[in-house]
Amino acid sequence: MIENGKLLNYIGGKWQRATGDSYLDVENPATTEIMVQVPLSTAADVDQAAQAAAQAFGDWRQTPAGERIQYLFKMKQVLEDHFEEIAQLITQECGKTIGESRGELVRAIENVEVACGIPKLMQGDFSEDIASGIDEIMIRQPVGVAAAVVPFNFPGMIAFWFLPYAIACGNTYIIKPSEKVPQTLHYIMTLFAEHLDLPPGVLNLVHGDKVVVDALLAHPTVRAISFVGSTPVARYIYAQGAKYGKRVQAQGGAKNPIIILPDADMEMTTRIAADSAFGCAGQRCLAASLAITVGDARHTFTEAMADTAVSRTVGYGLDESVQMGTVINQQSVTRIEGLIQKGADEGATVLVDGRNAQISGYEKGSFVRPTILQNVAPGSEIARTEIFGPVLSLMHATTIDEAIAFVNSGQYGNMACLFTNSGHDARKFRYEAQAGNIGINVGVAAPMAFFPFSGWKESFFGTLHGQSNHAVEFFTQTKVVVERWPKEWSRTF
Ligand code: NAD
């Protein structure tokens, strides 16, 4: 619900105004049109949401799992029925192409589908006669009130790595969308409020920034927090969560390397590498950011990538012919262009320069064209810092061992990919690369919803990842029951 151009919060089955009076403008990053205002809610709003969720929990956890998933079947239907409107909204507020927006929505729906298997997925274990006449049972129960804090780059998908599993397991839920792109989840919640008929308080949405996140972390009723965003904030959430005794899974930033061996199919490799580096304008946590060529791959790959980067069609994402949209805002343009300059200052060659992009009809839009930096030095800042824009840095190694050693020297471990024709080298890479997601002749190694999703090292703080059985474990706590029923206690009739 939107009131006088301002988004409302959804708490306890009702739309309500945030208690504070601070609002932020939400701008379309291509057209610069102000679409709506998002409230910066207060700790009092979080408290109301936590209380509503706690009140709903008692009945919701007693609703059989088979009944709870009936709401997920409706959820899938609603997302499919409104697929195109949601995709357009993602493009309008986030700047990616309409094809990319449709793609992320497909991924969201896949998670709803997988969570429909909860009656089986949250099943426990049973051992008979652990000692004579004694049985042991392990059951899974929901943790209570849980919350998600999500980033700007996938406004329609990332919440669904958690939300459907959380409620299907019997928890009640609070979502805090990114204040940069609040409309997509807001609209999805409007659809759920209209069509799902969920009991009030099972799903709540509170808009805002750090104030809301801190209130969620400190609130005694909130038992578990799922976070996705940048590494400094992920580290903070993990530490604060531990301080307040909560379950936390916190996914952070990335600097994803890809290695190109000389035997790779260069036409396919270039196409895939370009999609990885420049898709979603490089604002994907699985975007290729560093390409390490080995031996003779250097010249062919560099030339082909430069051609691809120059020829990419950049523009407003709602235009179906556009291959790359905007970055999120002007601050992001300034930061990315500053890092390109930093790379040049450190000695890299700016082979393709995407700075000062002018897109006809969208002159004030937040555009950066595809950029390629060549001869990036291994120890340089540009080789280590997450850019989160359409910038690919090229490095060179003489052997695969040297390339893998470089991959493993980075602070992050979200994704690493290898392009080759050799099964032996592929196996070596899969075995040795330190990353949570590995691609072999694949540029965006995004796990399907029935696999867990997260990184290693500073790309992840926690144990259980998002999606699939990991989400089920995160959103349930196990209880072990040891039972003895002596024969002499059996009833005689
Ligand atoms: P961000 O860390 O700035 O914000 C993420 C969320 O945290 C938002 O909801 C924001 O309101 C909140 N937040 C921001 N600063 C905070 C603070 N100081 N204290 C508490 N909460 C705070 O991230 P972003 O710019 O929205 O998203 C981009 C980042 O997310 C990139 O680093 C990207 O790699 C990462 N990301 C990671 C994954 C993954 O799976 N590992 C997926 C998508 C994005």
Image (tube, grey):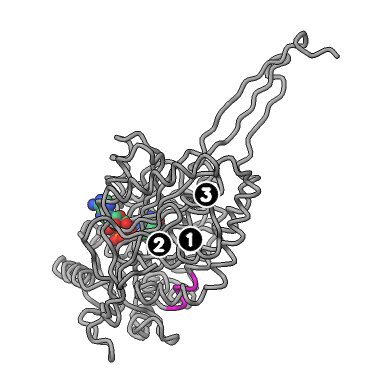
Dividing the picture into quadrants, the one containing residue 277 is bottom left
Which is more N-terminal, label 1 or label 2? 2
> Could you say which disc has been placed on residue 28 in the image?
none
**Residue 34 in the figure: left or right of residue 184:** left
Q: Mark 1: which secondary structure? A: loop
Q: Assign the magenta stretch its main secondary structure.
A: helix
Dividing the picture into quadrants, the one containing residue 492 is top right
Residue that numbered label 3 is attached to: 167
**Residue 439 in the figure: left or right of residue 242:** right
Which is more N-terminal, label 3 or label 1? 3
Tell whether circle 2 marks a residue whose Cβ is less than 8 angstroms from ligand 1.
Answer: yes
Q: Would you say the residues marked 2 and 1 are in contact, meaning their CB atoms lie under 8 Å apart?
A: yes
Residue 221 in sight from this viewpoint: yes
The three-letter code of the residue at mark 3 reads Ile
Looking at the rendered image, the quarter that the C terminus falls into is top right
Task: Depth check: give the residue in front, 257 or 56.
Answer: 56
Residue that numbered label 1 is attached to: 446
**1 vs 3, front mark:** 3
Residue that numbered label 2 is attached to: 286
Give the extent of the magenta segment: 98-103
Looking at the image, which residue is at 68% across and 16% down?
484
**2 vs 3, front mark:** 3
